[in-house]
Image: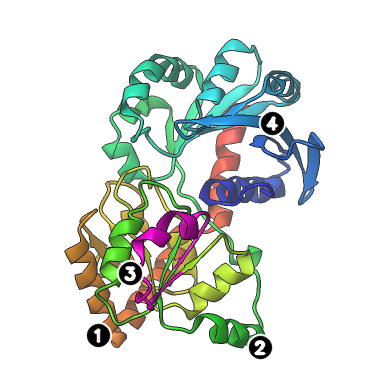
Amino acid sequence: MPDSFGGIESTVREIISQTSKFGVNSKILVLSKNNEPECINFENIEIWRAKKITTIASCGIPNLKIVSLYKRLSNWAEIIHFHFPWPVNDLLSIFINSSAKKIVTYHSDIVHQKILFKFYKPLMNVFLNQVDRIIVTSNNYLKSSAILSNYKSKIEIVPIGITKEDYPKISSDSLSGYKKRFGMDFFLFIGRARNYKGIDVLIKAAKTSTSNFILAGKNIPNDFKHSLHNDTKNILLLDEISNEEKVALLKLSKALILPSILRSEAFGVVLLEASMYAKPMITTELGTGTSLVNIHNKTGYVIKPNDCNELIKAIKSIETDNEKRLEMGKEAYKNFRKNYLGSEMGESHKKIYSSLL
């Protein structure tokens, strides 16, 4: 942030916000299309921006300016906290010397680029062997990752957390305006239009339903208009939305659907957001953290990935049993309060940082 908004961006923001309460001073190095000025101040944090020149296999490629920026910031830092996967991290860490301790948050295995991964794997192994700690966001992901099984001695489990006070407060008048604009009691999807999100499956299931559906996120209208016919009136596609619009959509929705089909969906911050507003969820079993945030038959339904019939069945269950839907929402909120507060994530990171120093 502020150049890009998404689950990992909000997680980085939350880590920095929460650890600053313990006296941790952070600076951020990112890729950006907008690299002028080179350093900006966002929420009292220095953000240093290297120019992104292209993208190859979902990997942002920077210009060479990132080398000098990394040297400068790594000389300043006592700890360098990487976020994986991004192969540029590996190259910078391995080939530029720094006395700083090194931590990596391992968000996801590399799932889609199987051929390229064979060439990248040796570099990745050197990088992961070199770092001092590896943070994994769920025990589910640790148990189901063949890569992480090689590094158990340096792994720490720290679930992602969020803070409700960081989200916009919406007045009743504003919410009424959003209600006129979007309606209410619709099924909601929020996320970027990526290959692993299962949006095609959701659209197919939505076409069989009498309920309304809103799909909101970057590139969704452009990428999925072809999936809709002129007579598909119960599906609304929205481009990237503001934080206030996101909160309004969550409050007005009946349930959140995250129908991802690949384990690239390692956690799903939007599930925490839905839980925070006491909404039930429909997710898929991927062997990742999504099935810890959404507990089958308690906070929502967990179904097989890429199974349209199961998704239709779960949607109908929420449509027809209002009492159970409300109870699932309450349980989702309890699970959020117990396990996924941003303050807890911040304290866990502070302990890891302190142990290295």
- Tell which residue pokes out farthest to the left in this image: 309
Gap between marks 1 and 3 measured at Cα: 16 Å
- Dot 4 or dot 2: first in sequence order is 4
Frontmost residue, 231 versus 199: 231
Residue 243 colored in magenta in the image = no
Q: Is residue 148 visible?
A: yes
Marks 3 and 2 sit apart, C-alpha to C-alpha, by: 30 Å
User: Which quadrant would residue 23 be assigned to in this image?
Assistant: top right
How dense is the environment of label 1, judged by Cα within 10 Å: few (below 14), some, or many (20 and up)? few
Q: Position of residue 177 (x, y in %)?
A: 62, 85
N-terminal-most mark, 1 or 4: 4
Which residues lie in the magenta part?
Answer: 215-236
Q: Which residue is mark 1?
A: 320
Label 2 is placed on what type of residue? Answer: Asp
Residue labelled with disc 3: 299
Q: Measured along the vertical axis of the image, is residue 1 above or below residue 180? A: above
Crowd around label 3: few <14 · some 14–19 · many ≥20 (10 Å): many
Q: Secondary structure at mark 4?
A: strand
Kindly tell me whether residue 337 is visible in this rendering.
no
In the rendered structure, which disc, 1 or 2, sits on the residue that comes first in sequence?
2
- Residue type beneath disc 3: Thr
